[in-house]
Amino acid sequence: MAKPNEKLAESLRQLKALQDQGNRVLRTRDLSRVHRERLLANGFLVEVVKGWYAPSRPSDHSADSTVWYASFFEFIGAYCELRFGSDWHLSPEASLAVHAGNTAVPRQVMVHALRAANHNLQL
C-alpha cells in the first residue's frame, strides 16, 4: 500500500503533466477526483469558481491572490471558450488593454457573446 507522501507525489506528477501542457487553469475533468481532492487538501490547488481550479503553493496564505492574478486572463479565455465556443469577445476597452500589454486585472470584465444570458459571475 502506498504511503501518503507517495500518493501526494503521484497527484503532483499529474498536476505537473497538465502544467507542462500549458494549463494554468484546470477544470474538474482534468484531474481525477482523488488527485483533485488531495491537491486541494494540501494547498496545491485553489478553487476559482465551481469546477475551475488554479495551481497554487501550499505556503501561500489563503488570502493571497497572486495565483488568481497570474491566471486571470487565461481563466476568462478558457471559461468563455467552454461556454460560448468562439462566439465571444471582451468589451472593446478590455480588449484594447490586453492587446496593449496591460496585464493588470480589471475590477470588472464584460464579455459579449451571442448565447450569453446577461448575468454576473462573481470571481
Image: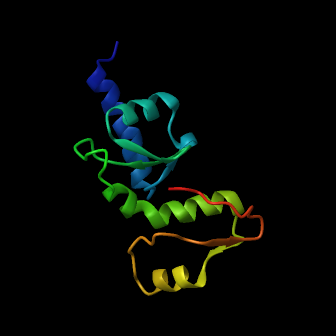
- The answer to which quarter of the image holds residue 59 is top left
- Residue 53, horizontal then vertical, whole percent: 47, 47
Residue located 32% across and 33% down the image: 42
Instruction: Tell me: 6 left or right of 79.
Output: left
Location of residue 33 with respect to 67 vertically, above or below: above
Q: Residue placed at 56% from the left, 60% from the top?
A: 78
Residue drawn at the location 37% of the way across and 46% of the way down: 16
Residue 83 sits in quarter: bottom right
Relative depth, front residue between 89 and 33: 89
Q: Farthest right residue?
A: 115
Q: Quadrant of residue 4?
A: top left
In the image, residue 76 above or below residue 18: below
Q: In this rendering, would 65 be left or right of 120? A: left
- Residue farthest to the top? 1
| Residue 18 position in % (x across, y down) | 44, 49
Q: Position of residue 77 (x, y in %)?
A: 56, 65
* Residue 55 x %, y %: 38, 48
